[in-house]
Image (cartoon, rainbow, N blue to C red):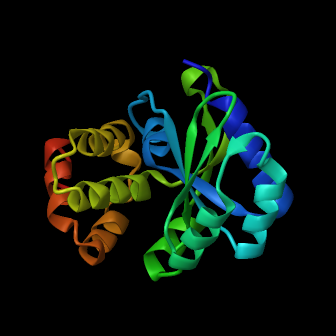
Amino acid sequence: MTALGPGLRRLIQAFEKLGISFFAGGSLASSVHGMPRATRDVDLVANLTPSQADALVREIGGEFYLDPDTIRDALAAGRPFNLIHFESSYKFDIFPLPHDAYHLEEFARRQFQPVRQWGDDFSLPVASAEDTILSKLVWFRQGGEVSERQWADARGVVEVQKDRLDVAYMRGWSLKLGVHDMLERLLVEAGMTTR
């Protein structure tokens, strides 16, 4: 498998040059905090304005497959869009930062973490372990609670991070996000029922 690094490093470089703040979520975040697994796509949450999007297209257009009209339409609708790095074929799903209370809190709690999976070794901002778990549970619920991968990713983070997790934070937001029952089930599975 081609290393993730070249495409991700180039995208990080472009984001930093253009002043676009971001963090990695999804399977990259759950691999950093929990059980590493192979992935062909990377989820990035970016606080991206339309003018920055135009500048991003100019900055990386020759290195990534992208559609400027799709990007503009996605930003206007608050939907994700994707970029595909030509050299590595990695797909990057870019999620515009929603400006609701939870997502702003999640964004504020992002942490620089080393990425050592798949032959790469560098650091980038990643969703916290707690927010990675919550996001995985939200995706699991929205997907009809059938994706064993989402559940396994969340469970892997709980099992690796166990005593370092801010369970009160997760319980508080899980009620507001509609995943409290699943969080409690996850904690029971991981033997954390007394916390």
Is 189 positioned to the left or the right of 86 in the image?
left
Q: Is residue 109 visible?
A: no
Residue at x-position 71% and y-position 74%: 50
Looking at the picture, does residue 132 appear above or below residue 148?
below
182 and 10: which one is in front?
A: 10
What residue is rendered at 64% in x and 66% in y?
A: 69
Q: Is residue 176 visible?
A: yes
Tell which residue pokes out farthest to the bottom in this image. Answer: 100
- Place of residue 39 in the rendered image (x, y in percent of width and height, measured from the top left): 45, 32
Residue drawn where x is 86% and y is 56% of the image: 17
The C terminus sits in image quarter: bottom left
Residue 83 vertical placement versus 47 (above, below):
above
Q: Say which quadrant the N terminus sits in.
A: top right
Residue 119 picture location, percent across and down? 61, 20
Drawn side of residue 112 relative to residue 54, left or right:
left
User: What is the x, y in percent for residue 183?
Assistant: 22, 58
